[in-house]
Image (spheres, rainbow, N blue to C red):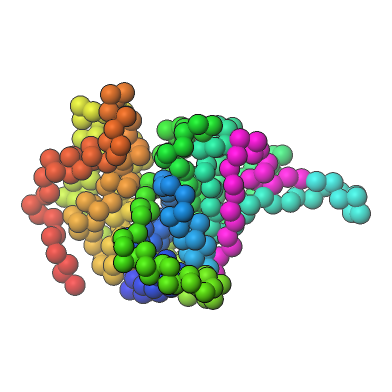
Amino acid sequence: MSLGKIAHAADRIRSNVSKVIVGKEDIVDKLIIAILTSGHVLLEDVPGTGKTLLAKALAKSIDGDFKRIQFTPDLLPSDLTGIHFYNQKLSEFEFRPGPLFANIVLADEINRATPRTQSSLLESMEERQVSIDGTTHQLGRPFLVIATQNPIEQQGTFPLPEAQLDRFLFKLKMGYPTNEEGIAIMKRFMADSPLEQLEPVIAAAELDEAKSIYTSVSVSDELLGYMLAIVEATRAHSDTALGASPRSSQALLRACQARAAIAGRQFVLPDDVKAMAVPVLAHRIALRSVQRMRPDAAEHVIQAILAAVPVPADAPLVSRS
């Protein structure tokens, strides 16, 4: 698969998902980027904004297996990974895989589970495998965790630790539809759900193959320095108690390369960096206690850094294709 084919595949997925989801093209693009980069996505929004529907539409579009896990305080790690059970007919133990063995996994209201259960996701998200009773089992390819959490209801929830937040490539918000989009949604779902008629437009294995291609997108030394300057600025900002980690700069680089690839470009632009910086970095910084109470405070910090860090003069500003 070439870079041109990656852009074509992204167009097909975007168009197919739009048969179910009204608007949200930017969110769909970021989900495609997450699959390409082997990243994961944290969707933070109120119920009813289409998070589950979006995950199902994406899974159908790539002909992938979809599993939904409702996270609750009594959910156990084995409920995610699976168990070995004794088969009396065969007189031996068999492995029964859990819902993590899918291509698209929706972890609904992830912050309602205990830290022990949340941490059981870490190995699967990072290593694409789970270890059960000393045996390692490989997960599906591609493998994307879309975790959701409600930012309003905090009672009975367990905040995600920084180590787990760092495993998410993006933290995104669906947002409410516009008036026009709201009318279009009601018309589209007036009869049957269009999700039932949705057909795959690309094989999951073909999309997984693209992972080895997008990294051929070139990035100039000037833009590498620009990305690093943004990450380092998070560590020196007066409102941050803890800045972005070196893993953050790697995530930003991969996201920028994948964004260029789905646009059909062979090189990264400063606009790619600006578009990816907030969703990649905002959830990876820890704010001082005074700032934590402000909504979207982390996003504002990253936006202020983008405004302050100069774009390198030698970086390409427009496409040369």
Residue at position x 51%, y 38% from top? 111
Total labels drawn: 0
Region rendered in magenta: 63-84
Relative vertical location of residue 184 with respect to residue 32 in this rendering, above or below: below
In which image quadrant can residue 150 be found?
Answer: top left
Q: Quadrant of the N terminus?
A: bottom left
**Horizontal and vertical percent position of residue 231:** 25, 39
Whether residue 136 appears in this view of the structure is no
Question: Which one is nearer the viewer's eye here, 211 or 21?
Answer: 21
Residue at position x 29%, y 32% from top? 294
Residue at position x 21%, y 51% from top? 274
Whether residue 19 appears in this view of the structure is yes
**Horizontal and vertical percent position of residue 244:** 31, 36
Residue found at the far top of this picture: 289
**Horizontal and vertical percent position of residue 36:** 41, 59
Relative vertical location of residue 114 with respect to residue 176 in this rendering, above or below: above
Report whether 16 appears left or right of 303: right
Report whether 262 appears left or right of 316: right
Question: Which one is nearer the viewer's eye here, 10 or 128?
Answer: 10
Question: Which one is nearer the viewer's eye here, 240 or 203?
Answer: 240
The magenta stretch spans residue 169: no
**Horizontal and vertical percent position of residue 226:** 18, 46
The magenta stretch spans residue 65: yes
In which image quadrant can residue 236 be found?
Answer: top left
Relative vertical location of residue 279 with respect to residue 285 in this rendering, above or below: below
